[in-house]
Image (cartoon, rainbow, N blue to C red):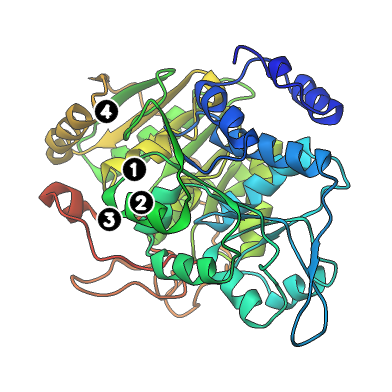
Amino acid sequence: MVSFAELSLTSFLADRLQQAGFTAPTPIQSAAIPLALQGRDLLAQAKTGSGKTLAFLIPLIERAVKEGWKPAGHASAQTGSSRSPRALVLAPTRELALQIEMELRKYAPPAVTSLAVYGGVPIERHYRALRQPPMIVIGTPGRLLDVAGTRHLDLRGIEYVVMDEADQMLDRGFLRDIQRILQLLPSQRQTMLFSATFSPEILTLAESMLNNPARTAVDPGVNTPTTITHAYYVVPSEASRVQLIHTLLQSSEAGEQSMVFCDQKYKVKRLAARLGGEPASVGAITGNHSQAQRERTLTAFRSGRLRSLVATDVAARGLDVPTVSQVIHYELPGNPTSYVHRTGRTGRAERSGATLLILSPQEEHEYLAMVRRLRIQTKRLTLPTLATLPPPAREPESNGQSRHDGRGRDARPRRTGERPNSMTQDSRGGQGRRGWRAGRPAAPRRGNS
């Protein structure tokens, strides 16, 4: 497929794609869309930032418009009748679920209704929205089970199922939840799994979910876009690490934005404050922030009011801001997958971008071993003249965390063997640093949905 015109899409969708500047599909879109439009079950593999979201949204929207979708009606033993959405999209994080629905609303006509269902907001809000069942539901597994378990969401009319970031879904310990969701779905449906890697666990899951699936792989494996340059600095002290990040943020061009990733929540809060906070156009996001706070910060970042965003891996997937020109790693990431997905926040849709690491002398050797494994070319940069840090931002009294120590119960570094707070995402995401260094996965855990 050379252009979207070859698909003979409905006029509304074709016009929206053209208005967005999309004429030629990406490789994963060329491979996946025709198969999806044929109604095939699909295992689709591609690297981050390759256009996977539109690869499943375009067939979904096209099918909804051409078939004149309405919520499916069927008999119910409890009420005599029931209505169900027609399509379900599963995502591992709140941010990705919201991002998918935002993309859907860009390209779908108003008659194709949708709802994002995720944790961190009062569940009554979803109950009210589901009184008029949407055609498409996008959600995280935990909250989907919550609303389905109270009979506010009926999944028996689902015809089209997508699991996005399937590798991340399993890595966050969602397998049992996914299996429970599958039991609520009809056996006759079209199912598609999108993933950066096809691990043995994903293939096992596919056997239970898919019927004679087609399989397509574009740039398979853990990889980063070729439009992104990789480089690193070695700093002598913690103070110079923070000062260097401030210098890099200040050197970005007008209209460009930056993301800075830390492994732990307390480091995000401390670093954002040291960089001047929102008065200096620096925002922060962690799993400890309320959903409302996270959405306000992301809205400010997308609109350009914030030029920089400091975050844990909660923002490493699902955030698509084209003006992010550089990703900065405060320290060596916990594992290669985390590095890849953080890096994928820049260089979106074949744009150029840069990823920079701030390393101690001890971390340099481990980083070079990691990039060799990922087959990435990197280079060490000379430290620039460091800019003077701004006055520290005044930290708010409360940001959804405990007041007792100013950092929140789960914000402090955890002792060896200590389990994370079950009500928040582990800021690492994926397996811990020890897991990838030792060549064995960490124990699975359920993410915050």
The residue that mark 2 highlights is 202
The residue that mark 1 highlights is 198
The label number, if any, that marks residue 431 in the structure image? 3
- Percent x, y of residue 221: 32, 33
- Sequence-earlier tag: 4 or 2: 2
Q: Residue at x 78, y 44 (%)?
A: 64
- Asked if the residue under mark 2 is in contact with the one under mark 1, i.e. CB atoms within 8 Å, the reply is yes
- Percent x, y of residue 21: 72, 18
Mark 3 lies on a secondary structure that is: loop
The residue that mark 4 highlights is 233
Residues under labels 1 and 3: Cα distance? 16 Å
- Sequence-earlier tag: 2 or 3: 2
Q: Nearer the viewer, mark 4 or mark 2?
A: 2
Mark 1 lies on a secondary structure that is: loop
Mark 4 lies on a secondary structure that is: strand
Q: Nearer the viewer, mark 4 or mark 3?
A: 3
Q: Nearer the viewer, residue 10 or 241?
A: 10
**In this rendering, would 242 be left or right of 431?**
right
- Asked if the residue under mark 4 is in contact with the one under mark 1, i.e. CB atoms within 8 Å, the reply is no
Q: Nearer the viewer, residue 61 or 408?
A: 61
